[in-house]
């Protein structure tokens, strides 16, 4: 069950954090009108989720059960601070436009959820893998949303104009409601695929 | 340094036009899982408003008088989250001691609030926008009320949606997200009236 390949499939599709568990969208949905920002944000989540899982799995015998949650939160904050400082140093423009959302990775339920559900009962290396794949499962769906929003909202991809000159941009795609509509629609499509698979069995 | 904003405008903006949940997507996790039941939605909304206002006030003081003078800004994430966790803990004990009936109503929600992104989000927004003490409190109160209003409205809408003929694949999370999308459009519709930020 806990093979590397099994974990990968589980986190990318069967038990994807975004469209199956609806977790952790708070900190990233807000930046999905821009592909570059979404990519940096979700990459940070991959980094923090992987290393948090690894750390928690490595020191789980040393943590008393009662203060487990607060220690996990501190471990997560530690890695988020590293990400924040790195972004400020190397990508100041991105760091500025992400604003408070980098810090909000701390309260991203996915990371603590995985630390609690997986890292507490597994070995460090596979926990690291679980954190990374959960992050990637989170990344691909949000990148897909950002792709649609940036393409229709600004007519560009990663800031490069791709739509023809006279393209009428969709203002709604830049605003918040479109993120809800697209995510709701994506969940609908994915559920339909799953349902049709089940009925064909 | 604090931006010059009319307090009433700030309150209105944080409840409606830049609603912490519908425009900034904060506090989604507990929002989606709790919004099925009216009473819990109400209890959670009330707790979030109270905790948000109290922690923002404490966070502002700590930020201004400890983090800035000692040049410890890089520690702010850890400091904010510890203050939030500690405040929630203390609040839980105080309510338990003085008002058991209120504790029965709110008790189960308080621990959930520590990991509610809206609380940390408001603290970080307050820091980035450089609000004064009074502005921070108004902003926190408005955000809390806005969150409360949104979760209660969603719980009320969900009751109707449950009876509606929703396509199989869209049931559950899908239709909830689309409903939230429409709510967000309605809230943001006020934004022509005032511009903050």
Image (cartoon, coloured by chain):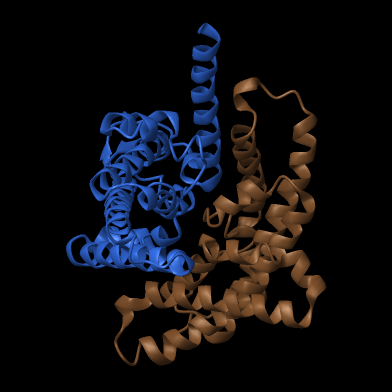
Chain colours: A blue, B brown
Can see residue B5?
Answer: no
Above or below: residue A180 compared with residue A10: below
Q: Position of residue A7 (x, y in %)?
A: 33, 34
Q: Position of residue A23 (x, y in %)?
A: 49, 46
- Of residues B4 and B109, the one drawn nearer to the viewer in this rendering: B109
Can see residue A178?
Answer: yes
- Of residues A110 and A138, the one drawn nearer to the viewer in this rendering: A110
Q: Answer with left or right where residue A130 lies relative to residue B141.
A: left
Using the rendered view, name the quadrant where residue B46 is placed.
bottom right
Q: Position of residue B43 (x, y in %)?
A: 74, 62
Q: Answer with left or right where residue B23 lies relative to residue B102.
A: left
Q: Position of residue A88 (x, y in %)?
A: 24, 66
Residue depicted at x 76% and y 42%: B157
Outermost residue on the left side: it is A90
Above or below: residue B33 compared with residue A167: below
The N terminus of chain B lies in quadrant:
bottom left
Outermost residue on the front side: it is A61
Above or below: residue B161 compared with residue A194: below
Outermost residue on the right side: it is B101
Above or below: residue A178 compared with residue B165: below
Residue depicted at x 56% and y 64%: B195
- Of residues A135 and A141, the one drawn nearer to the viewer in this rendering: A135
- Disc tally is 0
């Amino acid at each position: 069950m806990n093979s590397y390949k099994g974990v990968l499939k589980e986190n990318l599709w069967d038990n994807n954090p975004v469209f199956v568990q609806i977790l952790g969208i708070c900190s990233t949905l807000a930046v999905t009108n821009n592909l570059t920002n979404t990519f940096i944000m979700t990459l940070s989540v991959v980094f923090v989720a992987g290393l948090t899982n690894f750390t928690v799995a490595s020191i789980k015998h040393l943590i008393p059960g009662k203060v487990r949650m607060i220690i996990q939160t501190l471990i997560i904050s530690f890695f988020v601070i590293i990400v924040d400082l790195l972004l400020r140093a190397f990508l100041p423009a991105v760091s500025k436009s992400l604003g408070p959302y980098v810090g909000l990775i701390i309260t991203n339920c996915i990371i603590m959820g995985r630390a609690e559900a997986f890292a507490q009962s597994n070995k460090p290396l596979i926990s690291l893998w679980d954190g990374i794949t959960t992050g990637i499962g989170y990344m691909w769906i949000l990148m897909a949303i950002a792709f649609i929003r940036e393409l229709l909202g600004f007519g560009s991809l990663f800031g490069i104009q791709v739509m023809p000159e006279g393209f009428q941009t969709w203002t709604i795609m830049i605003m918040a409601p479109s993120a809800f509509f697209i995510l709701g629609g994506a969940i609908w499509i994915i559920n339909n695929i799953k349902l049709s698979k089940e009925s064909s069995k | 340094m604090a931006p010059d904003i009319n307090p009433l405008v700030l309150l209105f903006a944080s409840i409606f036009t830049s609603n912490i949940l519908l425009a900034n997507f904060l506090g989604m996790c507990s929002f989606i899982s709790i919004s099925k039941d009216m009473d819990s939605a109400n209890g959670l909304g009330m707790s979030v408003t109270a905790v948000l206002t109290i922690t923002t006030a404490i966070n502002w003081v700590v930020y201004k008088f400890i983090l800035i003078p000692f040049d410890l800004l890089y520690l702010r994430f850890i400091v904010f989250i510890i203050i939030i966790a500690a405040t929630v803990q203390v609040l839980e004990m105080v309510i338990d001691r003085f008002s058991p009936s209120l504790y029965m109503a709110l008790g189960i929600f308080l621990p959930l609030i520590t990991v509610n992104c809206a609380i940390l989000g408001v603290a970080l927004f307050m820091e980035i926008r450089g609000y004064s003490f009074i502005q921070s409190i108004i902003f926190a109160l408005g955000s809390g009320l806005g969150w409360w209003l949104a979760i209660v409205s969603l719980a009320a809408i969900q009751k109707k949606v449950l009876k509606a003929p929703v396509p199989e694949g869209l049931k559950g999370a899908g239709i909830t997200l689309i409903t939230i999308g429409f709510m967000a459009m309605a809230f943001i519709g006020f934004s022509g009236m005032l511009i903050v930020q």
